[in-house]
Amino acid sequence: MRRDVFQAIADPTRREIINLIAHQPLNLNSVAENFNISRPAISKHIKILTQCGLIMIKKQGRERFCEAKIDKLGEVSEWVEQYKKFWETKLDSLEQYLEKLQAKPINKKPKKINLKNKKHERSKSI
C-alpha cells in the first residue's frame, strides 16, 4: 500500500517519532523507549513513515537506525501555504473594513426620553 505524507503526519505518535529522529538518528530500541506502546506498534509506525519517505532505515552492524528525511514535509508546507495566503487575504479585507467603519463619524445622537412624560402617559392609560 502506497501512503502519502499526510497519512504519516496524521498520527501524533508518528509526528513525535519524526521529531525525535529529526535531531539525530536513533536505533529502533531508542525510539521505542520514548513511548508507552509496544515495540511492534512502534515498528508499524516506523514502517508507515518509511513507506511515506519520511524515514530511511540504515543498517550499521546488527543495529537498524532511523534517519529523518524531512524534505518530504515540503509537500505539506506547500499545501498549507495556499490556505495561509487565502486566510491572509480574508483577514486583510476584514481589517480594511473595520478601519473604514472606525473612520466614519457617528452622527446619530441618542434620543432623550423624558421619563416624567412617560409616567404620566402610562397613568392615563390605566
Image (spheres, rainbow, N blue to C red):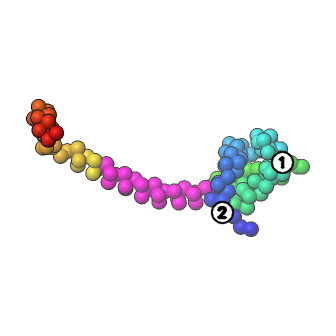
Q: Is residue 102 above or below residue 90?
A: above
Residue at the bottom extreme, as displayed: 1
* Residue 86 visible in the shown view: yes
Q: CA distance from mark 2 to mark 1?
A: 23 Å
Q: Position of residue 111 (x, y in %)?
A: 13, 40
Q: Which residues are magenta?
A: 71-96
Count numbered badges in the picture: 2
Q: Quadrant of residue 116?
A: top left
Residue 46 part of the magenta-drawn span:
no
Q: Position of residue 126 (x, y in %)?
A: 16, 39
Task: Verify CB contact (< 8 Å) between mark 2 and mark 1.
Answer: no
**Rendered image: mark on residue 4:** 2
Q: Amino acid at mark 2?
A: Asp
Q: Quadrant of the N terminus?
A: bottom right
Residue 95 part of the magenta-drawn span:
yes
Q: Is residue 120 above or below residue 21?
A: above
* 28 horizontally vs 49: left or right: right
Q: Is residue 107 above or below residue 78?
A: above
Q: Amino acid at mark 1?
A: Arg
* 74 horizontally vs 92: left or right: right
What secondary structure predominates along the stretch shown in magenta?
A: helix
Badge 1 marks a residue whose secondary structure is helix
Q: Position of residue 36 (x, y in %)?
A: 78, 41
Badge 2 marks a residue whose secondary structure is loop
Q: Residue at x 66, y 59 (%)?
A: 7
Q: Which residue is mark 1?
A: 39
Residue at the right extreme, as displayed: 62
Residue at the front extreme, as displayed: 126
Name which of mark 2 and mark 1 comes first in the sequence: 2
Neighbour class for label 2 at 10 Å: few (<14), some, many (≥20)?
A: some
* Residue 121 visible in the shown view: no
Neighbour class for label 1 at 10 Å: few (<14), some, many (≥20)?
A: some
